[in-house]
Amino acid sequence: MSARSFQPEVSVELEVPFHDVDMLQVAWHGHYYKYMELARTALLRRYELGAEQLLGAGYSLLVIESKCRHTHPLRIGDRVRVGAAFLDVEHRLHIAYDIHNLSREQRAAYGHTMLATVDSSGRLQLKTPDAIVERILRR
């Protein structure tokens, strides 16, 4: 993923809370994945692919890969914007993220997740079902 050319489709903003930091007041690295999930949830809901809609259509999504590259630490009280966008939807949902520290005006991290589709019987789908792809492409 070229982090410089990233254009988010959705963004969420948050403030790094006390319970996300260590004694040095730096956000624990695992919380970045939580922040990415908040943006992913907003992105999927934008396309009517929230958990309720997916389950209603007989599908669920599983994270099969995740990566986060940390560039600058987030600290207690920092305002953060997390952007998310689809990079690919054909065989799996490949979503890119940009985590930007608004308080310090710098990128804090960037990354991606890949999600595979599973049907209601638990069978892995080797291709993203047309019903899901069509919701994303029609917007």
Image: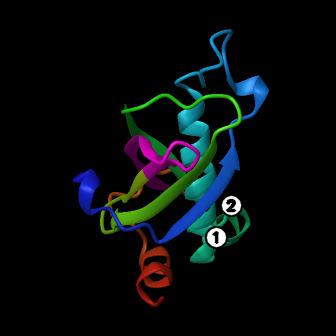
Q: Nearer the viewer, residue 138 or 103?
A: 103
Q: Nearer the viewer, residue 21 or 48?
A: 21
Where is residue 25? Give x, y as percent: 66, 18
9 up-or-down from 95: above or below: below
Q: Is residue 18 visible?
A: yes
Number of marks drawn: 2
Mark 1 neighbour class, 10 Å CA radius: few under 14, some 14 to 19, many 20 or more = some
Label ID, residue 111: none
In the rendered image, the residue lying farthest to the left is 2
Taking the magenta stretch, the answer to whether it contains residue 129 is no
Mark 2 neighbour class, 10 Å CA radius: few under 14, some 14 to 19, many 20 or more = some
Name the residue type under label 2.
Ala
Q: Secondary structure at mark 1?
A: helix
Name the residue type under label 1.
Arg
Taking the magenta stretch, the answer to whether it contains residue 108 is yes
What residue is pinned by disc 1? 45
Q: Is residue 32 left or right of residue 98?
A: right
Q: CA distance from mark 1 to mark 2?
A: 8 Å
**Residue at x-position 40% and y-position 38%:** 66
What range is drawn magenta here? 98-118
**Residue at x-position 48% and y-position 44%:** 63
Q: How is the image coloured?
A: rainbow
Which quadrant of the figure has residue 90?
Answer: bottom left
Label ID, residue 51: 2
